Amino acid sequence: MKITDVEVWALHGSIDAEWAHEERSANPLDFYPDYAKRDQPSVPDGSRLPVDRHYVVVRTDEGIDGLYGPIVYEEQAHIMVRTIKPFLVGQNPLDIERLWDQMSVGRHAHTGYFMMALSAIDNALWDLRGKYFGAPVYRLLGGPTRTEIPVYASTLGFSLAPGEAGKQAKRLAEEGFAAQKWFFRHGPSAGGEGRTANLRMAREVREALGESGDFMLDCWMGWDVPYALDMMDRLRELRPLWLEEPLKPAQLDGYKTLRARGALPLAAGEHLYTRKEFKPYFDAGALDYAQPDPDWTGGITELRKIAVLAETYDVKFIPHGCTAMPNLHVIAALPPSVCPYLEYLIRYQRQQNHFHKNKLVPAGGFLPLPEKPGLGIELDEGAIESKTIYG
């Protein structure tokens, strides 16, 4: 079997505005006060929210295609069809380890958009492999270890107005989510007022969940070491499961300081590329939870290797959840002790699932495993308002 073509489809559609983000999280630009004051853009009532996503298709001479998406960044599409496609045509798509290794040796291939493009191709190759062998990908990875995967509700975009976080946290718990993650809006430049608002939100969630509910808190690289140490002390009594990405990924020394002097478990990794960038964090004992993203860190091939590395260092492995499908397959082949949860971004996944027939929607806090060969992605032609093909 040989690869004959690689296409990227740019799909355009729209979704009800009720699924737009109402609030943004803190971010590194918030160290500049002018940026910190910028709010999430509002969407008029009754309007439609544009949904633009890309999908990659790897075609073969035996009529078996690998499909993967959604892919958010157009830059990946150009790299896939201009740089990676010429390399792949004529190759055996089942030789995934060899193809991954050869694709990743370019001068700038180990990070950024190139690695993100490689990740999408890798995921499509795993979909093709599953279809070739007539089995879901998790079976090719050695699973399943479970028949359904527990998910935690990730609340990016939810309103953080006084009272709203507690109300929504209680509703999510009633829907069966055993854990949920909330996002801080403010960083150091917001001063005491921002710190008070951050703490109010966290306390609302703890009060809504009671003593037994698990919740996590995400800073999205928007803090610095002194602010994080102070907040960790103040948040300790609320017992969050982890504090996520308080610093930028290059600040390994800062993470070591927080790990040594801070009062909370630490999670990070969505902005690290490949196991090579995770290893220094593991060697330093800087993380309690590793969060690689399958769309960015190297696809399923690299994701499972990071999982093995995390288990070796006794670090919990809970991948970042921009796309849930590859995570679902990898997690299904891991012991629950290694990966207890799958991240599910409530509002964002509604957009990510938009073009799919088989939408991944949790029931009672769990996702069932797909049974169709490959990853199980099928496109819903009725949701596609227009399509552009790169190839």
Image: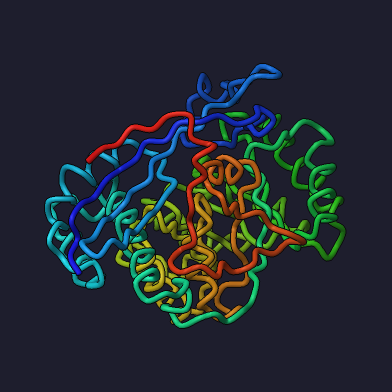
Residue at x 71% of width, y 18% of height: 45
Quadrant housing residue 10? top left
Q: Quadrant of residue 174?
A: bottom right
Residue 105 coordinates in the image, percent (x, y): 15, 60
Using the image as rendered, state which of residue 61 and residue 350 is in the foreground: 61
Locate the N terminus and report the quarter of the image it occupies: bottom left
Which residue is at a point 61% across and 23% down the rendered structure image? 48
Q: In this orientation, does residue 239 appear?
A: no
Residue 184 point in image, percent of width and height: 64, 41
Which quarter of the image is occupied by the C terminus? top left
* Residue 224 percent across, percent down from the top left: 50, 44
The image position of residue 219, as x and y in percent, is 57, 45
- Residue 67 in the figure: left or right of residue 262: left
Q: Farthest residue toward the top?
A: 44
Residue 274 in the figure: left or right of residue 339: left
Q: Is residue 255 above or below residue 186?
A: below
